[in-house]
Amino acid sequence: MAAGDPPLTLGDLADIPVERLRGVGDKRTKALSTQGIETVLDLLQHYPRRYIDRTRQAHIEDLAIGEEATVVGEVRRVSSRRTRNRRTLTTVEFGDGTGRLSLTFFNQPWRERQLSEGTQAIVYGRIDLYRGRRQMSNPVVDLVGDRTGRIIPIYPQSEKAGLHTWDLAAFVEEALSRCRARGLADPVPESVLDRFDFIDREAAFNGIHHPESMPEKSEARRRLVFDELLRVQLELVRRKSRIERETAGVVHQVDGELVDAFHGRLPFPLTGAQQRVITEISSDLVLPRPMHRLLQGDVGSGKTVVAVTALLMAVQGGMQGALMAPTEVLAEQHHLGIAALLEGMVVPDPSTLMGDRPLRVELLVNRIGAADRRRVLADLVMGKVDIVIGTHALIQEKVEYHSLGMVVIDEQHRFGVEQRAALRDKGNTGAAPDVLVMTATPIPRTAAMTVYGDLDVSVLDEMPPGRTPIKTIWARTDLEEVAVWSDIREAVAEGRQAYVVCPLIDESESLDVRSAEETHARLVHDELAGLRVGLLHGRVAPELKESTMADFRDGRIDVLVATTVIEVGVDVPNATIMVVLDAGRFGIAQLHQLRGRVGRGSHESRCYLVGDPATPDGEARINALVGTTDGFRLAEIDLELRGEGTIMGERQKGRNDLKLASLRRDREWVESARMVAFEIIDSDPELDDHPGLRDEIDLVLADDEAEFLMKG
Ligand code: ADP
Ligand code: MG
């Protein structure tokens, strides 16, 4: 690498294998490879997981009992013995020139090897007094070799591969010094660097790996986080704009009699949020490019009205609409509800005497029987069906449309590139139908930008009036649980109804079923004796399921004991109590969905979360539910508790480029990166004027990974 050559790009770094570095031989190369480090780029992106600030280290002679402290020193002596209750106790005499400290470790026999005499280490822990001597028990230990410097980076290391943090630090240092002659290229436009006051990329890599001070490290991190997020956003925005430029869409007739008539006959005015979202949708639908929009709205926020409005916008222009639900049961429920909403409406039909005919909404699921199915399929091709409701089967090969213009996908996470392509062909008009994806699982804004960055996002953030607030109560003790059952009895005596959701059992559906059956039997004989108690779970035969639901809806059953099959779609306004047994085992989103089953009528509702969870996370989840009914707030808390892995996991498997950036910590940077990405792509859609950025995206977000960004 000679001076005079152009600065090194990330692509250049990715072309240099680690064995080219001094000190990295065959054995090290193999070890690094087990950590996913093959190239100099991998190495430079193997960031320290934390730092030790030696300027804040304490001297042993100054340590006070009860204090937590970081001490840098050397192992003087180490020994292990068995205690009376047959645990190993390893004791390390540790000194720093000002005094001595003993470190004790229980049941960690490997410490004897790790902390052999003469080893330099940094230990962190609380100082106790034991038999007149100062000690730390089970301190955090970092081996740092003989590294000096004020700030010591601690790398993710692997005992097994024999890679220590100081090895990694040395390799990184060697790599950085080899880069110095040519320098690192910085493809991010100057104007962006200036606007955010970013340091250059080479300084950032140096600063993240061996900062002189903690503020220097923070500056470096800020810059590198932005780079990661910018790459992801550029890729998403580039693809989004490409689809918009290259795919022809339907220009819908968004103003028309059907939509007006529909809104006019609703027994309530639209909420402000519904109006706003409908405007967002219609401004997409009048454009000659396909809409691909995500509608987020909490349970009960009134998504159905919005969905039907969008479908009618297609229908009033003479096209067809389809609504896909995740299960047949939910499709049936949607069909019932939507058919009722549209009952008696007519669409123009010049071939009839009156010039119009009834608007037709059909259900297409397996249960309707072969003859009905054939009829619906035939009428779909003829254009005699206006709105069809079903599952994913609606976009399978066998279903043909006359002119499909609008597709609504409910409660759906898995709608990917192939489905998008399938839809384009279904349109049958040469234009791709518009797509509205609805979800009742809100995800935080910045996460949505990263995970669904290729979609436009609309949010229904206002509940229709008339929902009574739900009180959420944690019934932690047996005594508190007793009160739950007597509350149900009182409510039933007043004519109300209740749900009881049974403990979730991870292992298998059959265990879930058994648990539901046992709970049902117990309640019938004991706590709820004398009440009419129904049972619903995944193995109940469809006809029985149907009749049980109908009995509950019509008030012939007081209490419905169920598994999470009732999670979505069930709407019985007279049900005012939701009991979730062993609530600590459910996720936040799931509990929130379950709670959304009540509070749908004018009576005051309660949600009881029963049980004493064994884990702090379980407690935190229950507390979150008790603390708020705001789905977006809960989604934020869920993100805090679970980390972004789970959210990213929904759409993005495998590797992703976010090594430093966190969707939680770096929210504001997600937004900034997205803004910058739009600015760049707006004026340079294929990044022809930004070849450095384009190469980087192609390098780190290889094609198949970018596909993952797009699908679910
Ligand atoms: P979601 O699908 O978002 O959970 P729904 O569309 O099922 O919510 O609506 C929940 C309930 O609120 C339904 O009973 C619906 O009739 C009612 N609703 C919808 N919009 C309004 C509104 N603007 N005012 C009053 N009630 C509404
Ligand atoms: Mg719904």
Image (spheres, rainbow, N blue to C red):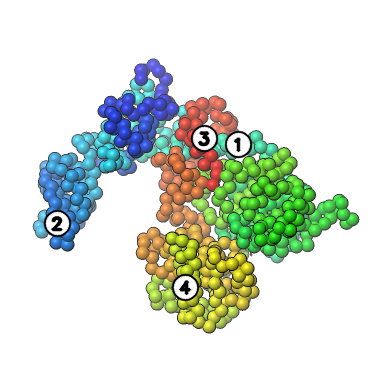
| Amino acid identity at mark 1 | Ser
Residue annotated with mark 1: 241
Q: Nearer the viewer, residue 460 or 247?
A: 247
Measuring from the top left, give residue 470's x and y in whole percent: 53, 68
Of circles 2 and 3, the one toward us is: 2
Q: CA distance from mark 4 to mark 3?
A: 51 Å
Dot 1 or dot 3, earlier in sequence: 1
| Amino acid identity at mark 2 | Arg
Q: Tell me the SS state at disc 1.
A: helix
Q: Nearer the viewer, residue 495 or 387?
A: 387
Q: Tell me the SS state at disc 3.
A: helix
Of circles 4 and 3, the one toward us is: 4
Q: In the drawing, does residue 271 fall left or right of residue 382?
A: left
Dot 2 or dot 4, earlier in sequence: 2
Residue annotated with mark 2: 82
**Contact? badges 2 and 4 (CB < 8 Å):** no
Q: CA distance from mark 4 to mark 1?
A: 55 Å
Of circles 2 and 4, the one toward us is: 4
